[in-house]
Amino acid sequence: MAKSTRTRGQRRRVVTPGGEALEPTAATVSSHRARQATVATILEQVFGPFADMSPQLWERRAYLLLVGSVYERLATNDEVTTDELVKLARVLAEHRRMKHTAVDPVDESDDEAAQGNGRLPNRLADMVRDLYGAAAESDNEEALKKGGVGG
Amino acid sequence: MANGRDARQIKHIRNEVLVALKVIYPAAMQAETLLRSLLVLFPTLEFDYLRRDLHYLQQKGYLERVTPSFEPDEALTPWRRRWFRLTPSGTELADHCIQDPALEE
């Protein structure tokens, strides 16, 4: 029985019916590079110019943008389909889950959110206030309890 | 051939890494994201190969690792989650301002 002389790496290579390894064509490479440049332009326009940043900042800015977008749609009573709302909620939940699994120390507000008591974590409420100058729902509840709204 | 890859493919992948990081310079990208992007061009690329290429480019001084403040011990961070950005030399190479025969296709 003949032994295969191929290495492990070679065995995993995907080949075309003609036996050639898959290599991108010049057109594919060019189109991929153009796409990357476009993505970079979009990111720059949305998040501002790329800076010599710390990676965690990107995540936070993306999170702020997402929270802002959710808040805007809800606050302006814009039509949000259930499907859209579910997707947005999933993204936010995934983000929070990611933060819990990260080595980043977890603060009490995160624990509160994880327990599912329905309140926005304090930091989130602060962020919404900073962004829009408006109080998030949880803050209004607090204020109502203290009799501080409209009174 | 090196681990089932020929020199042309190795150079091609390394160059695409530089191109990918060039468009976001001076920001950084995670190795996992890089891999996903490169899979568009190289569907059979395995992370282990990319890890070697990243290590090589780092040793050549074209890439540098960016360590977020929340990483307590950078040596323990899995490769896929490590962030990389171009160094000034890497940018010059990606912009074709300098040449490296080892990366010329």
Image: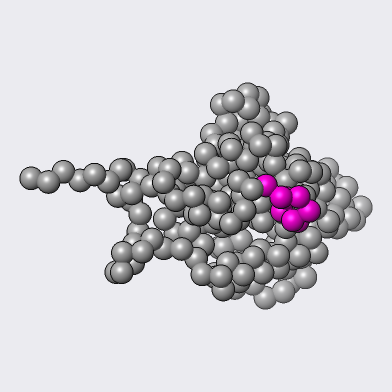
- Residue nearest the viewer, comparing B97 with A29: B97
Q: Quadrant of residue B55?
A: top right
Q: Residue at x 86, y 50 (%)?
A: A130
Report the front residue among A92 and A108. A92
Image-based side of B76 in relation to A20, left or right: right
In the picture as drawn, the residue positioned furthest to the front comes out as B101
Report the magenta stretch's main SS. Answer: loop
Magenta stretch encompasses residue B96? yes
* Residue that appears at 64% across and 72% down: A80
Residue A142 magenta-drawn?
no
Q: Is residue A58 visible?
A: no
Foreground of the two, A110 or B33: B33
Above or below for B105 versus B72: below
- At a point 64% along the width and 48% down the height, the residue shown is B101
Residue at 89% across, 55% down? A133
Q: Spot the residue most to the right.
A: A151
Picture coordinates of residue B4 (x, y %)?
38, 47
Tell me if A4 is positioned left or right of A84 in this view. Answer: left
Q: What range is drawn magenta here?
A: B93-100
Viewport quadrant of the N terminus of chain A = top left
Task: Choose top left, top right, bottom left or bottom right for residue B78.
Answer: top right
Residue B89 occupies which quadrant of the picture?
A: top right
In percent of width and height, residue A134 lies at 85, 56
Q: In this orientation, which residue lies closer to the viewer: B30 or A11?
A: A11
